[in-house]
Image: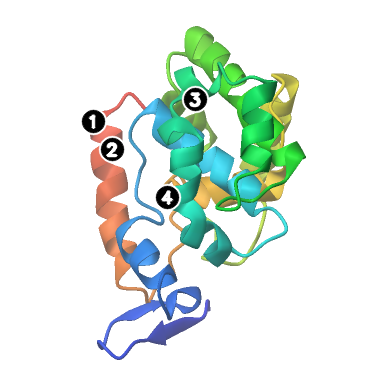
Amino acid sequence: MSFVTTGDDGVTRCGWAAVEPETSYHDDEWGFPLHGDDAFFERVALEGFQSGLSWRTILTKRENFRAAFAGFSIEKVARFTEADVDRLLGDAGIIRHRGKIEATINNARRAAELIDTQGSLPGFFWRYESEAEPEPQSQTTSAESVALSKELKKRGWKFVGPTTMFALLQASGIVNDHAYECVTRERVAVARAAARLAGPLG
């Protein structure tokens, strides 16, 4: 059984969401389906920046990231140059890691290519939905995240390892990894069902 916590508001949530800013992110975003190519690109980028760090670090800097990376517009970030890399390395509001910055710019270009050939990022990523959902919060990778990582790397993406991609699947609602006892699990289940009906996700 996955760990849960009951807050001062009487709400039972996944254990990692006991305090802000994690609580609001958990209640309003984590596990709910993303809509649009740029939303998926932003999440891939932020999950990549989170590698080796806490998600709290990313959440507290998210608005700075959005400002620094042109709102995570794939079209705009794909046109970033070495001058932008230098600018970003001097931006104390974000994670100043050259490899991750360069990977984000590279991935914007790869995302544009993928959209051209596959139609959309949501349609592509939802192909990696598992037929059987795992026990909530019992793993950090899956067969699907390994396959997704391999496919993206083959297409030239960077910082998209299996653990990072499993975090993406969790965060974007492709896997509902909220604890069974968590009040948000059912809301995510309803949102996922609605997203499938709205399609195309496959």
In this picture, is 145 found above or below 25?
Answer: above
Q: How many marks?
A: 4
Query: How far separated are the C-alphas under marks 1 and 4?
Result: 29 Å
Nearer the N terminus, badge 3 or badge 2? Answer: 3
Residue type beneath disc 2 = Ala
- Upstream in the sequence, badge 1 or badge 4? 4
Element under disc 4:
helix
Residue 124, numbered label: 3
The quadrant where residue 128 appears: top right
- What x and y, as percent, mark residue 194? 23, 41
Q: Which mark is residue 198?
A: 1
Q: Residue at x 55, y 39 (%)?
A: 44
User: Which circle marks residue 195 in the picture?
Assistant: 2
For label 3, the SS is helix
Question: Answer yes or no: do the residues labelled 1 and 2 have beta carbons within 8 Å?
Answer: yes
x, y (%) of residue 199?
29, 27
Residue at (49% x, 8% y) in the render: 116
Q: CA distance from mark 3 to mark 4?
A: 26 Å
Decide which of tag 3 and tag 1 comes sooner along the chain: 3
Label 2 neighbourhood size at 10 Å, few (<14), some (14-19), many (20+)?
some
Type of the residue with mark 4: Glu
Type of residue at label 1?
Ala
User: Dot 3: few (<14), some (14–19), or many (≥20) neighbours within 10 Å?
Assistant: some
Q: CA distance from mark 1 to mark 2?
A: 5 Å
